[in-house]
Image: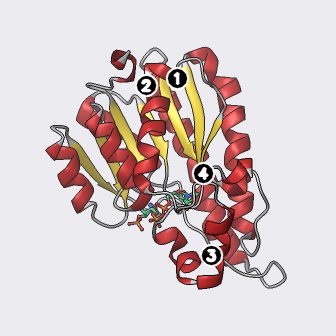
């Protein structure tokens, strides 16, 4: 059975892999055999070290995905380095908090441009490469509990992550015929920079832990198995699915 999870020699682009969930997913993919193309604004020093310690190559691309301008170069650099692309993990994402009555256009655009627009156009560019390679490939989008629920004070984030779930389904419908699997992972409440304000608010922290069947915040490493599954042949007949990795939050 382990052979169908083996990713030896595959090439995975992971956006936002210098910290948090992206770092853990890049390391898990490398430990399963992938070479990694990391896309970040800041240096991914620790991730690079851990990928190389796993015996894999890491290509360090610095790019700001708040616009779609760097996308052509990202794909070009990945293909130049490795000759092909097999996996794309659309992980880079931000959140802005504010009451809907006061929410600004700047906080709307910043979140939607990175979390949704760049996700679509990077997926499009990578899928064109998959087709050029003769088909097959894996795209894994990072969704959220707010792909399923409304949330409060995070209007642009909820819109973007609900959009990510819809886009995952649409792209799966269009690209399954090319042998491309498009799926998403919806992390629950995970202990990263993204949720630091929630964890440092004692009341919110207690509310979240009290509702979580697993009784603990998720760790970035909790995404290791799910991302390897969705990147591997083990998920070849899984299309358009959003896999919650949430300690049971949605089951509650
Ligand atoms: P994080 O620790 O804040 O990491 C965000 C990553 O995105 C960083 O690597 C960051 O690197 C990158 N990034 C931010 N802006 C970027 C830009 N303009 N261009 C390129 N990269 C950019 O957050 P995280 O919790 O690991 O979040 C990762 C993903 O999971 C996000 O999509 C988030 O919405 C989602 N998520 C998180 C949780 C959670 O509980 N933590 C739950 C559900 C979903 P640079 O700043 O160096 O560019």
Q: Position of residue 12 (x, y in %)?
A: 36, 37
> What's the CA distance linking mark 4 and mark 3?
16 Å
Which residue was labeled with disc 1? 235
* SS for callout 2: loop
Q: Earlier in the sequence, mark 2 or mark 3?
A: 3
> What's the CA distance linking mark 2 and mark 3?
37 Å
Res 209 quadrant in image? bottom right
**187 sits to left or right of 89:** right
Instruction: Tell me what residue is drawn at x 16 percent, y 45 percent.
Output: 52
* SS for callout 3: helix
Instruction: Tell me what residue is drawn at x 27 percent, y 64 percent.
Output: 43
Foreground tag (4 vs 3): 3
Q: Position of residue 174 (x, y in %)?
A: 68, 25
200, 60: nearer the viewer:
200
Q: Earlier in the sequence, mark 4 or mark 2?
A: 2
Q: Position of residue 109 (x, y in %)?
A: 66, 68
Foreground tag (2 vs 3): 3
211 w.r.t. 4: above or below: below
Q: Are marks 1 and 2 in contact (CB under 8 Å)?
A: yes
Which residue was labeled with disc 3? 206
Instruction: Tell me what residue is drawn at x 39 percent, y 59 percent.
Output: 63
Badge 1 crowding class, 10 Å Cα cut-off, few under 14, some 14 to 19, many 20 or more, is: some
> What's the CA distance linking mark 3 and mark 1?
36 Å
């Amino acid at each position: 059975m382990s052979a169908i999870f083996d990713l030896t020699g595959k090439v995975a682009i992971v956006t936002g892999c210098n910290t948090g969930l992206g770092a853990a997913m890049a390391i898990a993919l490398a430990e399963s055999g992938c070479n990694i193309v990391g896309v970040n604004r800041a240096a991914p020093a620790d991730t690079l070290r851990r990928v190389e310690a796993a015996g894999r190559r890491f290509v360090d691309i610095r790019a700001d995905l708040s616009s779609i301008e760097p996308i052509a170069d990202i794909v070009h650099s990945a293909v130049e380095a490795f000759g092909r692309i097999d996996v794309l993990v659309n992980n880079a994402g931000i959140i802005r908090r504010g009451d809907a009555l006061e929410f600004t256009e700047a906080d709307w655009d910043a979140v939607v441009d990175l979390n949704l627009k760049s996700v679509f156009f990077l997926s499009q560019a990578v899928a064109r490469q998959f087709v050029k390679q003769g088909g097959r490939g894996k795209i894994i989008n990072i969704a959220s509990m707010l792909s399923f629920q409304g949330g409060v004070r995070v209007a642009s984030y909820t819109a973007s992550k609900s959009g990510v779930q819809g886009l995952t389904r649409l792209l799966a419908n269009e690209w399954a015929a090319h042998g491309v699997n498009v799926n998403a992972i919806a992390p629950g409440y995970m202990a990263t920079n993204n949720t630091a304000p929630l964890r440092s608010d004692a009341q919110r922290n207690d509310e979240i832990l009290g509702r979580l069947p697993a009784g603990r915040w998720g760790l970035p490493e909790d995404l290791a198995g799910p991302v390897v599954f969705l990147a591997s042949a083990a998920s070849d007949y899984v299309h358009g699915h959003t896999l919650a990795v949430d300690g049971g939050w949605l089951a509650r």
